[in-house]
Image (cartoon, rainbow, N blue to C red):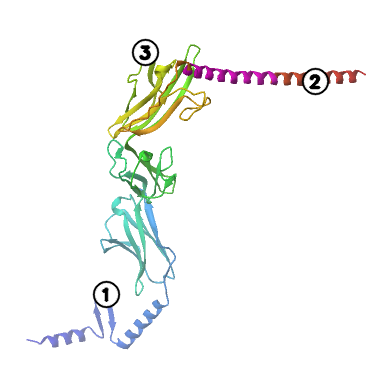
Amino acid sequence: MVPASEVLMFLMVSLGSRVATGFYTYNDNYSEENYEYNEEVEVEEEANYLPVFESSPTVYRVREGNTARLECKVDNLGPMVLSWRRLINNTSEYIATGSIVMVRDKRYSILTSTSSSMLLITLMTPKDTGEYVCEVSSTPPVHIKHWLKLKAPPSASILGKPSSGQFTIKSGEELGLVCRGGGEPAPALAWKREGQPLPDGEMSVAADQIIYSSVGRGHAGTYTCVADNGAGRVARDSVVVQVTYAPVISVDHSYIHNPANISLELVCNVESFPVASVQWSRTGEHKQINMDKARVGLRGLGRHVLILDNPQKSDLGPYQCSANNTMGTVVAAISVSEESDTGTEGATTQESDTVTIVETVSAIDTPAVLSDDKGDHKLLKHIIHKMKKFEHVNNDMVKAMKQSNRYLFQILRNQKILLNRNSTNIIL
């Protein structure tokens, strides 16, 4: 048997002075020194090119179904090529190198030039969003990042909002409202209260949440979260905040002059939530209200009225309105007394009203009772005084109108005289 070394020598001799290996052909005169020299020249030539990115890292926002165009421009690129890769969960997936697309997705394509590369993704979907890297095949490689996001209109959502759209909270408790915004680009969030400023007096607050440590009835209203993406697109979400609190009462009175009689109205203004039930009553010596001459009415929201027709001595004394809801009971007292001619201590003057108002007191307090030692003629005298005062005002108004008419008549008469004189001068 012929040794393998001899067979190899035979083949080399038979092939002559040339040896073919793969696609490359080497000459017998091949010099290792020449090869090393040529490599150094090639590296030196590439080192003369310093790539500089002309494009900047960019956030691309594309609507779903449209085409995304990610651009990468490089100055002084030379013989180097540009590649695209995508970062997914801290791993890289190459999409294209030079003009060759390396993924099977037909939606991906590449447009190249001597100094740029553009990655095109048609029919944009949410799965295409993420980070994309344009890389130069330099030593070492340099790159820039682009971010591809799905464009979406702004949205606003109040967290924990009940299906009824209402928050009900007790007075003194803490109120916190939190809003979550969505969309691309991310919107700026702000809070406002419909039809009135926020409890701190501001018209709006730029924040995703607002917190009030202790609420009162002044915190009730409709709160709205506004999401604005700065491109003319705005979204809103609202919630109604209701604060439960015990009734708050203020009292007032007025006279009504009718041709047939004079009526005294006792007014009890009640604010409360839930809505309070209101009752009128008397205290002291006269426990009952004479409903033959008294009427109860409601004028507007929370304005409760007790009307006394032709008030007399028997109508004098303390009255009270009681407002009650689930948060508590509150009583306000109004004392009806007559005027005193002497203006002594504890009585009103003739120019004052004959109703003494005792402001809101708690349910366990007893309203003050004003005593009366006068007769019916005192109350009647007061009513006549009021009527005369009203008549005196009317007389003053009539007198002023008469004086105005006389003054106007004088002006017209003087004007007529001047016109007659002018016409006489023209004739002459």
Could you tell me which quadrant the C terminus lies in?
top right
Q: How many residues crowd mark 3 within 10 Å: few (<14), some (14–19), many (20+)?
A: few
Q: Amino acid at mark 3?
A: Asp
Magenta span has 395?
Answer: yes
Could you tell me which quadrant the N terminus lies in?
bottom left
Q: Where is residue 397, by image quadrant?
A: top right
Horizontal and vertical percent for residue 315?
40, 18
Q: Nearer the viewer, mark 2 or mark 3?
A: 3
Most extreme residue toward the left, as rendered? Answer: 1
Magenta stretch: helix, strand or loop mostly: helix
Residue beneath disc 2: 414
Q: Amino acid at mark 1?
A: Phe
Q: Which mark is residue 60?
A: none
Q: How many residues crowd mark 1 within 10 Å: few (<14), some (14–19), many (20+)?
A: few
Closest to the observer: 107 or 35? 107
Q: Is residue 114 above or below residue 239?
A: below
Instruction: Name the secondary structure under disc 3.
Output: loop
Residue beneath disc 3: 292
State the CA–CA distance, disc 2 to disc 3: 63 Å
Mark 2 vs mark 1: which is more N-terminal?
1
Residue sitting at x 30%, y 40%: 169
State the CA–CA distance, disc 2 to disc 1: 128 Å
Closest to the observer: 376 or 141? 376
State the CA–CA distance, disc 1 to disc 3: 124 Å
Magenta span has 144?
Answer: no
Residue 31 in view (yes/no): no
Q: Amino acid at mark 2?
A: Asn
Residue beneath disc 1: 23
Horizontal and vertical percent for residue 142?
36, 70
Residue sitting at x 10%, y 87%: 3
Q: Where is residue 71, by image quadrant?
A: bottom left
Closest to the observer: 147 or 1? 147
